[in-house]
Image (cartoon, rainbow, N blue to C red):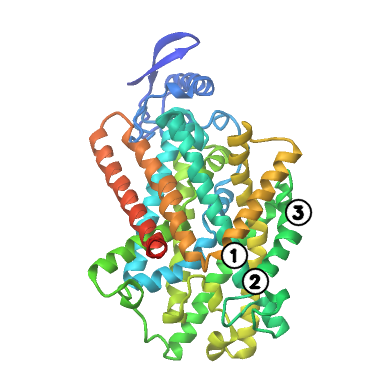
Amino acid sequence: MHTVLWERVKGTVSVLPLPFIGRDGPSRESANEEDQVDQALRQVVREEPQDIEEPLIQSTSAVSGDPDLEEANLAPADAAVKDEGSSIPSTVFNLTNTIIGAGIMALPQAVATLGIVLGSLLIFLVYILSHVTIDILARASERTGKWTFSELISSYLGKAGSEILRFFIIINNGGLLITYTIMLGDVLVGKAPEYNGVVTNLTGIHSGDVWYLDRRFVVAMVVVIFLVPLTLQRSLKSLAWAGAVGLFLALGFSSLTVVLVVLAALQGDLTSISWLPNPDLTGPDIKDKILGVFSTLPVIALAYVCHYNVHPLLRELKAYSHRRWAIVLHWSLGLCTIFYLIIGVGLYLVFQDDTQSDVLLNFSVKSLGPLVGDAIAEAITYTVWLGYAFNLVVTYPMIQWGLREVLVELFCGAPTVSAVPWALTTFIILVVTYGIAMVVPNIWPVMTITGATAAVAIGWIYPALILAKTEGPGAWARRGAASIVILLGLVTAVVAVWSTLGPYISKIWGH
């Protein structure tokens, strides 16, 4: 007979017997005892989930020998008794869509910089880090009963840790909104001197001298006509369907990439490719190559970071157990990694040394015509451009929603306010992100800074700090592993920020 020490079942301390379930199943007496234990455990979970004292790193089935019983104890307060919520496939869909964002368009440039071998290895490394760190957050919530990201951080790192988290969410969401705005300009107008975009191609005028084709004017019109009314909504229920757009585009984009790679291979165009770091992009010295790795790593990290959106999915997962969540995490991150490898490596193979920081700029009749013919190339180009322009417009309000709530709560003391401060905060975000996007040359520096600061902090350092503060058997091993992740995050942040801002700072000091 195994026993579990259970405290405060109706104000008393008792030792409840848990039967050993053999190969032939439990006896009638043992089954009755188990039912009593199950009811007691579920009642206490709803009242005091923080009283569970199992080690974070330990499997949730290690106490009683009955994994389903133990995992029910560690579920969100209502999940142990309700049959409502999202199924595993639905949660996989939602988490996958949460992960995939604008970062996917910068991965071909990351592979072009690092080479196919190192670029693929780093994508896989960040996949492993993301899998481990998200699992740490889930297990920590099971242990503490804190089922929001901010509450969990506050329980481990105090109010200061939670306040600093706000800062990183501002950086992360603000950086994404700036990236989205830059990409809208890339798609609609293009960049000098080609000016190869939707509007310029439709008008046949590839010049920045015409005022109504100026990048600043076109993007401003999109902001006023589309983004202002969408972001002023007090509810995002009307845009709930838009989440499916991102995953649909990723599937279509991956399929298109495979076709283009096959066509390029059949035509013998896969010749000028780099398997190792490209000296033309990183520099010839070993030091330059190392700097290139740490400068590119944040962009890949940004493509995976979703940690602040995990807890709503945890709470909504039907009949929550850690094993069910592990299935969701495995499939979601696996699908994203497949998409990232196909698009990152594949589009680099197609465009090779011409790969740009925003790979959408590579789509044109000139670049795709030799592969598929001009007519099909034009159809592909407009489909990709318009599809992603639409996705950026409908996704922008979702990203801004989280940023606005943090700002409103920071300055007004509550996440929900009256219409005037709500609208004022919305307009400030739109104006600031638009202004920065119009002066930043491309998405690469924005994604590098955002990834090196916010993504590394939220996705690596915060979960590692939680792991380091977890007591119990194996604490020294956990602290050692956490220290390695924290060190990697700090080195990546410092190197990436300096390599991105250093040239600008040198120019300022030089003058």
Among the two numbered marks 1 and 3 on one chain, the one whose residue lies closer to the N terminus? 3
User: Which element type, helix, strand or loop, lies under badge 3?
Assistant: helix
Disc 3 packing (10 Å; few <14; some 14–19; many ≥20): few
Residue depicted at x 34% and y 30%: 55
The label number, if any, that marks residue 229 in the structure image: 3
Give the residue type at disc 1. Answer: Met
262 or 29: nearer the viewer: 262
Name the mark on residue 438: 1
Dot 3 amino acid type: Pro
Residue 148 lies, in percent from the top left, at: 52, 35
Q: CA distance from mark 2 to mark 3?
A: 21 Å
Asked if labels 3 and 2 touch by Cβ distance under 8 angstroms, the answer is: no
Residue 311 locus on image (x, y percent):
52, 40
Would you name the residue on which mark 2 appears? 215
Residue 71 visible in image: no
Secondary structure type for disc 1: helix
Outermost residue to the front:
511
Compared with 246, 156 (above or below) is above
Q: How many numbered marks does the figure carry?
A: 3
Eye-nearest disc, 1 or 3: 1
